[in-house]
Amino acid sequence: MFKKRCLALFMAICSVLLLAGCSTAPAPPPPSITPATTVPQITDTPPATQTPVPMPLSQTGPYFVGKRMYTLEDEGQKLEITVWYPAIKPEGYPGSVASKAAPDTSGAPYPLLLSSTTIGNYFSPHLASHGFVATGVNGQRPSDAWGAWLVDYPRETVFMLNQISKTKLEGLEGMIDAEHAGALGYSFDGYNTLALGGARVDPEFYRAQCAQAAQREPPLEEWYIKYYCAAAEDWEAFVAAAGDIATNDTDGLWQPMTDPRIRAVMPMAPEGAMLFGEKGLAEVDRPMLLIGATEDKGFMSCPYDLEAVYIYNHVKAQDRAMISFIGQRHLMIWDQEPKARMRHFATAFFGYHLQGRAEYADYFSPEFVSQYSDLAWGAYTEK
């Protein structure tokens, strides 16, 4: 087992790099999270029959991109956000994103996309170039353990949606269609995306997982229990942070942390399976496109079978899909090719569901994915 001081140093580095949020060492599954007894759409990757076509929507779209920051305040709550939007390119400007550029109203209003600014930096400029207004909550970052952020982040994101809808953003009047919103996130923000898609906390399931963790054979390593079970170990504080959300319905689940204006969600390499469980994930009730990395394990990981596959198998939304990136690890977001592919799929998925571009369905379909030998439609099992 890695020494604690090494783990602490590594987590400090991860915080600086702003991309962690999942377990940060080799990850055996918790005791009771197992694959579904009936597994839909488990496929091997079909052989590529021709040279794969380029992913056209990975290219920058027709709009120049502006960027602005705002402070949202209401009833004592204050939130800093970043917004990327279609803009008019300033004359002679050499870059691709300009601060406070004049908005391009030619296609307004534009559908709204929600994420953290941490993850938005990877995807939002691209999506704005394709005709979206993309917003991120500043300060939402990876943590070294589960805790109050599990309820704070979804709640902040819904607050952002409410404020944008209610008060409008100065300088972007008429630009945003907040009634047609989507959410996307990667890693820790993938959890946030699931919550915004309707997934609900199952407190009994989660606490049972953590209660059994130390007795498992072979036992789970200390770092694993410390990360995932921190909220269970300080349960009263976690419940207090959740407030009204921690009100059980007759099904034993906490209240949802979403909004009906969020019409489609795209979690990428997400975490959250232990907190939501089978019942909580079944509450995701809107279109979902999930991205998983088949070698997501070890340091900086959200284990593929434990997280992505488990989540996909238990989400019951009729319109849901999963694309597996074969051979990729958790940090594929830092590599140009997989990042470009995720941008393509995000543009296609949200373009179809929020912009009404029916032709984009072909760009995130089994037939399209089958052209790539290193992608699989659905959960992937090696031959």
Image: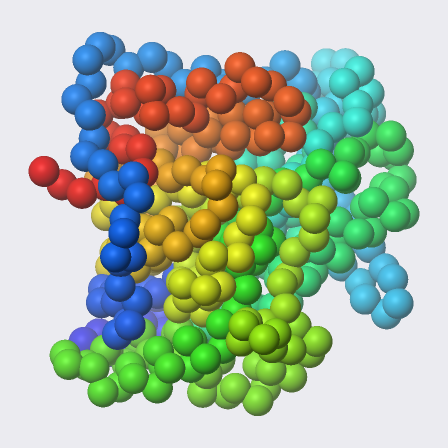
Placement of 351 over or under 120, stated as above or below:
above
Placement of 105 over or under 304, stated as above or below:
above
Location of residue 140 in the rendering, given as x and y in whole percent from the top left corner: 60, 59
Location of residue 242 in the rendering, given as x and y in whole percent from the top left corner: 64, 76
Q: Residue at x 14, y 79 (%)?
A: 218
In the rendered image, the quadrant that contains the C terminus is top left
Q: Is residue 311 in sight in this rendering?
A: no
**Which of the pair 11/95 is nearer the observer?**
11
Q: Residue at x 64, y 22 (%)?
A: 356
Location of residue 52 in the rendering, given as x and y in whole percent from the top left corner: 28, 15
Q: Residue at x 87, y 42 (%)?
A: 168
> Would residue 42 appear left or right of 199 to someone viewing this image?
left
Task: Name the residue at the left extreme.
Answer: 383
Location of residue 282 in the rendering, given as x and y in whole percent from the top left corner: 47, 57
Q: Is residue 201 in sight in this rendering?
A: yes
Placement of 285 over or under 58, stated as above or below:
below
